[in-house]
Image: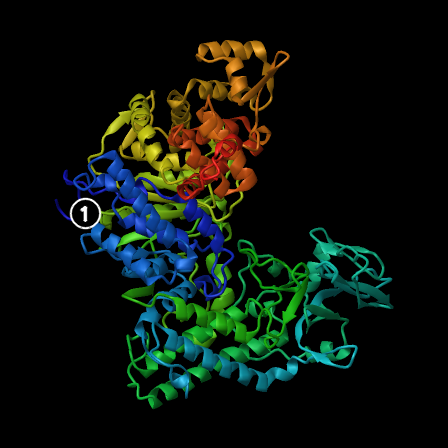
Amino acid sequence: MSSGTGSNGTPRKKLIEVALPLEEINKQSAREKSIRHGHPSTLHLWWARRPLAACRAVLFAQLVDDPSSRPDEFPSDEDVLLERKRLFNIIERLVDWDNVNDKALYEEAHAEIMKSCEGNPPPILDPFAGGGSIPLEAQRLGLEAHASDLNPVPVLINKALIEIPPKWAGQPPVFPGAAESRMGDWPGATGLAEDVRRYGQWMRDETEKRIGHLYPKAKLEDGTEANVIAWIWARTVTCPNPACGGTMPLVHSFWLGKKKGKERYVEPVVEGKRVRFEIRGPKGQPREGVVGRNGGVCMICNTPVPLTYIRAEGKAGRMDAQLMAIAAEGPRMRYYLAPTDEHEQVAKVERPNDVPDGELPDQALGFRVQGYGMTEWADLFTNRQLVMLTTLNSLVGEARQNILADALAAEIPHGDSLVHGGTGAVAYADSAALYLALAASKAAVFHCTQARWRPDADKSAQAFGRQAIPMVWDFAEVSPYAGAGGDWSGIIDGVCKVLGGVPGLGLAVASQWDATKRDYSNVIISTDPPYYDNVAYADLSDFFYVWLRRSLGDVFSDLLGTLLTPKSGELVADQYRRGGKEQATQFFEEGFRQVFSSIRREAIVLYPTTVFYAFKQAESDDVGEASTGWETLLEGMIRSGWAITATWPMRTEMATRMRGMVSNALASSVVLACRPRPEDAGVIDRRALINTLKAELPGALKEVQQGGIAPVDLAQAAIGPGMAVFSRYARVTESDGSPMSVRAALILINQILAEVLSEQEGDFDSDTRFCIKWFETHGFDEGKYGQAETLSKALDTSVAGLDRSGVLKARAGIVQLLSPGELPETYDPLADDRISVWEVAMHLAKRLDEQGIEAAGQLMAAAKSRVDLDTAKELAYLLFSICERRNWAQTALLFNGLGSAWSEIEKASRTAVPIMNTQQTLDLTPEED
């Protein structure tokens, strides 16, 4: 047997192509959103990152063999199932963030990869590296990681995450006295992280010396002082009413704090041609905002003012800002203070001469501010913010010189620069400067006029709450010294926690490449490409680029040599850049096919390629809602010579949305596994495709279900084995000889999935089959006795028997299935003299919904000797599909929950205390009791 191939010479199937513990991956991916401290995403903002848990699981499963592909080691179905469960256990532990620093676990995972890769795992490349989730997780798994991107900002982020930390593994800090601050060695990049912290503190102290007077404290009523968290401003224009002509504040919301008992809001008071602001609360309510999508209202004369006028004033340079409130630090709460002349005047500083160059695009996806006269990136900041940020970024260069001097004093050889592969003092100073510059760049999202005040949380909200630059009317100007959002020490601390916690091992390279032009030989691909016009990466990232170029232009002169980020080659369907939506779509799709055609020609055939796809595009048609972007992706991949072998829905939100099965409703993203289609692939017709799907899909679905996939995700996961059949052929022909489209194939796959689920009814007992048929028509509503009697005879059961068993009630000519909520609280399957799979499934759903995993596990432990639990699991999936077809959303959620939690319930059942009913308790002897 050759390396990576089976006995027949074909590449071995990988785990990702057969089954995954999807529910646990999705649960941990959703949980990851709430993890902030030390999470790599907090190093620097980037848009649409994939969860680390999902990337880690996908990479492991992309490289590790499915046990079915090793029949010499796992000859029976039972052997395969047991081995697959063992591998699932590794994945379930890997995706848990609590285990992210478990070295023994990662050594165990790496050993599995080495075994499947014959001791020589391939390098991993993400050619659209973005925020770096995939390369970082490849490195964490002990693999050689390569990251590339056309945009310089993500290249720098990836260098900071994967390339630089291994260079300085074990290097103690050079800041005077820092190396002696702890006993023992400095593992990983902790020494570099300590230097970034120390020199970052030096930068803070220097900025406070130079510009601290611009951030005065607030004076409280009792004469004491408090640190200002934020100054909250409202933009203003002059009222167009000739009889008024007053200064007109444009306030979206007057709320300051909404926490119960601590409510505060701004109350405007008209005084002549101006409005002054007072603070009110906790009683009362603020007035409604006076600006929105349709324009504004002058609070002095109540004249409605259209947005066209406000835009014209902005473009004429006549838009200003007025201080509305001051938020200050207080014990256990925020102090909200009315504006003072001192605080308003101290902010009126001159605009610095050395602000970053760079103009905003005339038009761009998600941009709105240009219509109000903001034409340069520097226009998104107040003058005080520009003074602070230019000072901070200038200090990055000064800090770099200090680091170099201290590194030489620590007897580190001078060496070459970082970009020329240096490993001495110059390269070390360059490395530390990169993290300081990323921190200064990150600070800009707090210190700009896109930052808002969040009254629900009594704190500021940074810019880019979404992937856009909209107009913000009332903004929060935060202090860099207040210990709250935007505090420089807090930003530096966050960067250092990431740096100290990244793997920092092995070979890793981050470089700038156009994905349509780079080399793909001798690597395997796992990537998260752009998706049509979802995110205008290049235009948005210029917000950071103008600052990074200022602070790091001397260090990365080639990478940061252009005025703004590259635009012409960016693979985004930008209608403003391409001359219209149709041209933009064509550009994107052609570029996408070009990239994956290149990968197809140069790919290592022993391993599948994995592609994350985030869903956005949808249109309504005669078969429901069809995801056109999704279909185009599949069509493009197949046309580029790929065979799709798996599709896994990845959810980062725990909420479930119900749609018809024919729509193939996508999760937040879908992971595709695909392999190059053989050059000699044949041609089949529609009938042959249907027969092949019917032959292969049932077995594939059973394997998919083993991973505890949620019923709501089954239709999406079924596309994988269905598309594996469709895309293995060069062409599938319709009855008229025309080629079958992906949409037609998806409809067929869904139809056959429904048939497969229905055919599972043959595995059920008579009582369960009756309940399924009745449920399909009536749900848990009433039906006529005569219909029930006829159905029961056809299925070899009786209505009376079903009534006695406790699954339905038959009264006065009416029959009604008992819903889980109507079932009795106490149920013992060991004492049930007419047990059915239906009854056990209903009670499990009830226990799970009302009492949780442990109680459901106790019931399952008692039931496993009475019914086939695999059949009960199949029933949960079948009932969900029935509910989905009938649009019974709430009931569907109940069965989706049962199917999703099945693996956890099974785990709980293994250690459950046996159920003991009342009669059994009474029969115990005193000794037994």
Nearer the observer, 447 or 205: 205
Residue 319 in view, yes or no: no
Nearer the observer, 237 or 837: 837
In the rendered image, the residue lying farthest to the bottom is 409
Please tell me whether residue 746 is drawn above or below residue 153 in the rendered image. Answer: above
Q: Quadrant of residue 777?
A: top right
Residue 290 in view, yes or no: yes
Q: Quadrant of residue 140?
A: bottom left
The number of numbered badges drawn on the structure is 1
In the displayed structure image, the side of residue 639 where residue 921 appears, left or right:
right
Visual colour scheme: rainbow
Q: Secondary structure at mark 1?
A: loop
Residue 4 drawn at (x, y percent): 18, 47
Q: Amino acid at mark 1?
A: Gly
In the rendered image, the residue lying farthest to the left is 1
Please tell me whether residue 190 is drawn above or below residue 807 in the rendered image. Answer: below
Residue 94 drawn at (x, y percent): 36, 54
Residue at left offset 38%, top offset 20% = 762
Residue 733 drawn at (x, y percent): 31, 26
**Quarter of the rendering occupied by the N terminus:** top left
User: For mark 1, what is the residue?
Assistant: 4
Nearer the observer, 270 or 903: 903
Please tell me whether residue 685 is drawn above or below residue 449 in the rendered image. Answer: above
Residue at left offset 56%, top offset 54% = 366
